[in-house]
Amino acid sequence: MDEYGECTVRMENMPPHIKGFCYHDDDGNPYMILNARHTRETNAGSYLHELNHIERGDMYNQRYREYK
């Protein structure tokens, strides 16, 4: 994460089908939102999944689509 700096992670209550998502603010700082209704184990997996998106820069790739 050194190249991106600190990643802010927040827990929010979301619908059960949403595990989490990530985005960058206007300054390019990464943020991750995880579902507070999920178990610690599920959130650990979601954290790694979203971290991969941040490290790959998927938010900057207009062609990237996780869900079709």
Image (spheres, rainbow, N blue to C red):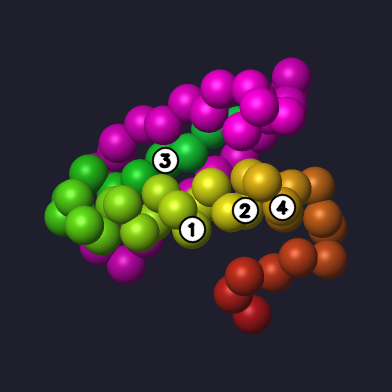
Q: Mark 4 vs mark 3: which is more N-terminal? A: 3
Query: Mark 3 is on which residue type?
Result: Ile
- Within 10 Å of disc 3 (Cα), the crowding (few <14, some 14-19, many 20+) is many
Query: Mark 2 is on which residue type?
Result: His
Find residue 8 and name its label: none
The vertical placement of 56 against 2, above or below, is below
Disc 2 + disc 1, Cβ < 8 Å: yes
Q: What segment is highlighted magenta in the picture?
A: 1-29
Residue position marked by numbered label 3 in the rendering: 33
- CA gap between label 2 and label 4 equals 5 Å
- Within 10 Å of disc 4 (Cα), the crowding (few <14, some 14-19, many 20+) is few
**Rendered location of residue 53, percent (x, y):** 62, 53
Query: Mark 4 is on which residue type?
Result: Arg
SS class, disc 2: helix
Q: Is residue 44 left or right of residue 6?
A: left
Main SS, magenta region, reads loop
Find residue 56 and name its label: 4
Residue position marked by numbered label 1 in the rendering: 49
**Quadrant in the rendering for residue 54:** top right
Closer to us: 36 or 40:
40
Query: Mark 1 is on which residue type?
Result: His
Disc 2 + disc 4, Cβ < 8 Å: yes
SS class, disc 1: helix
- CA gap between label 4 and label 1 equals 11 Å
Residue position marked by numbered label 2 in the rendering: 53
Camera-near label (2 vs 3) is 2
Q: Is residue 20 left or right of residue 65?
A: left
**Rendered location of residue 13, percent (x, y):** 24, 43
The residue at 47%/26% (across/down) is: 8
